[in-house]
């Protein structure tokens, strides 16, 4: 069943979210105060609307409370972002994701009940930094301030060893949740699965433990 999304704010971040959702075949309403931006999305989104979402009557007239998920991607106007989120919350929207500009903005959004808060620039910065520092890390997804999922390439040091030989869970407190091996993906690999050279291990755990694993086994 198609989910219905509304994306408020069609800057770079909001535009990319809107396009990605539309490509996935979702119903998307694109909303912005800039008529030119809205016109750009008239053929991409299911509906494209010019509107000021800090006005409660506009929110009500658009029927946004009936959408499955609303993404507030308003750019530099923190006040508009906060007020829009507050109105959406009071209107009874099921799920609200908001782009935060800074830590103060995030604190306010948390207090008024935003379901998900994201820092796209900060998060991307961390991902890039992590990849630059480690030769073995292909990708990095932050789950929280302290936990991540990381794609790590197996080198000669650990190839030929089974997961139980490496004793990764006991020694490092992390888990290999999947292994990519060329075209094959092994989900929840068994303890006797032998790691091969250039396998991509998808590892989940605390950042401090993943870093220990990288340095000890892959350094």
Image: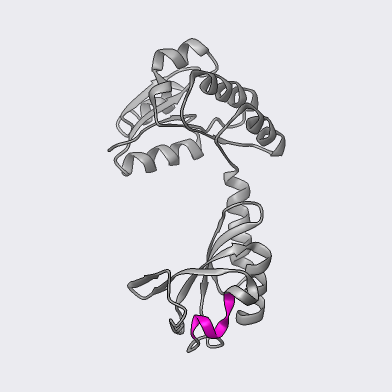
In the displayed structure, does residue 209 sit left or right of residue 149? right
Identify the residue at image location x=40%, y=26%: 38
Figure quadrant of residue 165: bottom right
Q: Residue furthest right?
A: 104
Figure quadrant of residue 49: top left
In the displayed structure, does residue 204 sit left or right of residue 16? right
Q: Quadrant of the C terminus?
A: bottom right
As displayed, is residue 209 above or below residue 69? below
Figure quadrant of residue 66: top left
The residue range painted magenta reads: 162-168
Question: In the rendered image, is residue 135 in sight?
Answer: no
Identify the residue at image location x=32%, y=44%: 24
Identify the residue at image location x=56%, y=25%: 85
Q: Quadrant of the N terminus?
A: top left
Residue 28: where, in percent of width, then height?
A: 36, 32
In the displayed structure, does residue 130 sit left or right of residue 96? right
Question: In the rendered image, is residue 198 in sight?
Answer: yes
Residue 207: where, in percent of width, then height?
A: 65, 63
Residue 129: where, in percent of width, then height?
A: 63, 61
């Amino acid at each position: 069943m198609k989910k219905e999304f509304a994306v408020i704010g069609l800057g770079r971040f909001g535009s990319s979210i809107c396009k990605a959702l539309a490509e996935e075949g979702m119903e998307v309403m694109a909303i912005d105060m800039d008529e030119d931006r809205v016109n750009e999305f008239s053929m991409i989104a299911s509906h494209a609307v010019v509107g000021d979402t800090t006005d409660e009557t506009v929110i009500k007239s658009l029927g946004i409370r009936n959408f499955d998920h609303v993404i507030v991607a308003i750019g530099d106007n923190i006040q508009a972002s906060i007020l829009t989120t507050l109105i959406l919350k009071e209107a009874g929207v099921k799920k609200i994701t908001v782009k935060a500009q800074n830590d103060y903005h995030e604190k306010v959004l948390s207090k008024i009940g935003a379901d998900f808060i994201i820092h796209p620039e900060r998060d991307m910065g961390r991902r890039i930094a992590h990849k630059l520092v480690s030769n073995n890390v292909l990708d990095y997804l932050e789950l929280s301030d302290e936990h991540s999922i990381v794609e790590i390439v197996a080198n000669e040091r650990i190839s030929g060893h089974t997961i139980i030989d490496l004793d990764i869970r006991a020694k490092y407190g992390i888990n290999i949740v999947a292994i990519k091996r060329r075209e094959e993906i092994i989900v929840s690999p068994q303890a006797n699965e032998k790691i091969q050279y250039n396998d991509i291990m998808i590892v989940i755990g605390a950042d401090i433990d993943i870093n220990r694993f990288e340095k000890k086994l892959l350094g």
